[in-house]
Image (cartoon, helix red, strand yellow):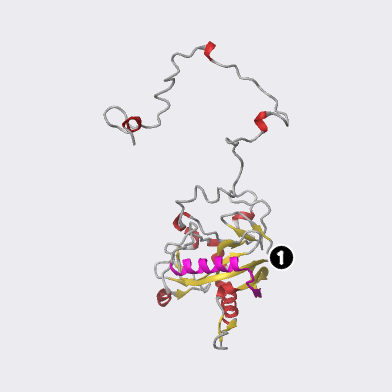
C-alpha cells in the first residue's frame, strides 16, 4: 500500500476512518451552485434505446442461483430453530380464531409446522423419513401453573423410580411436578421442499411410538458380500403419517403410521444421513414443547 493510499484510511491523530456521512454532510459540495447542476430528464425507454442494451457495465439482475448462500455464511446450527411437527387438537391455540396464535385454516387433526407455519391435511397424511429417536423424561410444573415449557427438559430414566401415580395415572414427584415420558421422533417431511422436524408422542401415543420403532427394527437389507441380512438404517425407509380421531371421556386426535417404501432419492438419503449424524453428536436441538400435547 502506498503512503497516499494509507493516509486515506486514517484521520488526524491516527484514528481509523468511519463512514460518518451525517457529520460530513455537504462536504465537497460547497462550490456547486444551481448552474452547475443538470436538470433530470424523465425518459420513456424504447426497445431500441441505448439504455436497454447491455455493455461491459451490465445492469444488476435477480440471479439468486449464482448468489446462492450469500449472507448465510455465519449461521450455524445453534442459530437455527428445529421445527416442531404438531398434531392439532380441538383445544389447540392455532385453531381458535380469537387467539393470538390462530392460524388461518387450522383445524383439529391437521399437522402444523411451528417454524414454517405450514399446515398439512391429517386425513390425506404426509410422508416422512425417521432419522433419529430418543426417549426423554421432562419435568413439568402442575398443569394449572405451566407456561409452555418444562422446568427441566430431561431428567433421565432414573427419575421414574422417584414418581408415584396419582388417581389420573400421572407420574408425580413429591414436589408436585409431573414427569411426562416423551418419545421424540426426528424426521424429514417429504414434499416439494424436504423439511426437518421433530414430532413427539406422549401418554396414549407412546404405543404408536413403540409400534413405529418396531416397524423400523424389522426392516433388513442383504449384505452382498456375505449374503447375510443386516438391519436397515432407520432413515432408509419412507412412512405415511395420518391423524386419526380417538374417543373416550373426550375426543382427541392421534397418529397412525404405516411403512410405504424404501428411500429412492440419493440426495434425500444423504440429507437424512447427515441429519441423523448431527443429532447423534448432539449438534441439533429442538426448542419445541407444548403443554397441550402432554394430555393425550
Q: Position of residue 255 (x, y in %)?
A: 63, 70
Which residue is located at x 63 percent, y 48 percent?
A: 98
Magenta stretch: includes residue 266 = yes
- From what the image shows, is residue 164 above or below residue 69? below
- From what the image shows, is residue 104 above or below residue 175? above
Q: Position of residue 278 (x, y in %)?
A: 47, 66
Position of residue 238 in the picture relative to residue 134 (left or right): right
Which residue is located at x 66 percent, y 55 percent?
A: 106
Q: Quadrant of residue 58?
A: top right
Residue where numbered disc 1 is placed: 124
Nearer to me, 99 or 69 = 69
How would you classify the magenta stretch by its main secondary structure? Answer: helix
- From what the image shows, is residue 69 above or below residue 109? above
Q: Residue furthest right?
A: 47
Nearer to me, 264 or 102 = 264
- Can I make out residue 191 in this image? yes
Q: Position of residue 9 (x, y in %)?
A: 35, 32
Q: What segment is highlighted magenta in the picture?
A: 260-281
Magenta stretch: includes residue 89 = no
Quadrant of the drawing holding the N terminus = top left
- Can I make out residue 199 in this image? no
Q: Quadrant of residue 296?
A: bottom right
Position of residue 87 in the picture relative to residue 274 (left or right): right
Q: Position of residue 277 (x, y in %)?
A: 48, 69
Amino acid at each position: 500500500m502506498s503512503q497516499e493510499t494509507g493516509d486515506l484510511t486514517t484521520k488526524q491523530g491516527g484514528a481509523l476512518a468511519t463512514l460518518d456521512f451525517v457529520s460530513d454532510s455537504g462536504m465537497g459540495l460547497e462550490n456547486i451552485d444551481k448552474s452547475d447542476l443538470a436538470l433530470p430528464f424523465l425518459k420513456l425507454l424504447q426497445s431500441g434505446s441505448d439504455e436497454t442494451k447491455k455493455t461491459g457495465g451490465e445492469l444488476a439482475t435477480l440471479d439468486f442461483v449464482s448468489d446462492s448462500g450469500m449472507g448465510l455464511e455465519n449461521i450455524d446450527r445453534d442459530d437455527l430453530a428445529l421445527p416442531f411437527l404438531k398434531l392439532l387438537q380441538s383445544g389447540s391455540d392455532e385453531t381458535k380464531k380469537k387467539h393470538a396464535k390462530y392460524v388461518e385454516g387450522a383445524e383439529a387433526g391437521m399437522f402444523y409446522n411451528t417454524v414454517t407455519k405450514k399446515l398439512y391435511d391429517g386425513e390425506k397424511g404426509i410422508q416422512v423419513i425417521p432419522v433419529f429417536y430418543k426417549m426423554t423424561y421432562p419435568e413439568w410444573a402442575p398443569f394449572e401453573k405451566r407456561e409452555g415449557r418444562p422446568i427441566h427438559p430431561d431428567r433421565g430414566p432414573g427419575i421414574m423410580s422417584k414418581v408415584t401415580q396419582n388417581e389420573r395415572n400421572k407420574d408425580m414427584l413429591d414436589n408436585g411436578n409431573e414427569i411426562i415420558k416423551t418419545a421424540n421422533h426426528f424426521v424429514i417431511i417429504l414434499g416439494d421442499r424436504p423439511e426437518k422436524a421433530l414430532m413427539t408422542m406422549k401418554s396414549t401415543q407412546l404405543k404408536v411410538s413403540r409400534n413405529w420403532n418396531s416397524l423400523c427394527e424389522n426392516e433388513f437389507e442383504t449384505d452382498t458380500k456375505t449374503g447375510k441380512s443386516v438391519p436397515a438404517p432407520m432413515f432408509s425407509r419412507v412412512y405415511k403419517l395420518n391423524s386419526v380421531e380417538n374417543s373416550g371421556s373426550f375426543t382427541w386426535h392421534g397418529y397412525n403410521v404405516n411403512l410405504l417404501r424404501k428411500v429412492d432419492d440419493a440426495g434425500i438419503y444423504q440429507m437424512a444421513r447427515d441429519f441423523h449424524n448431527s443429532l447423534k453428536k448432539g449438534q441439533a436441538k429442538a426448542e419445541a414443547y407444548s403443554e397441550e400435547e402432554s394430555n393425550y
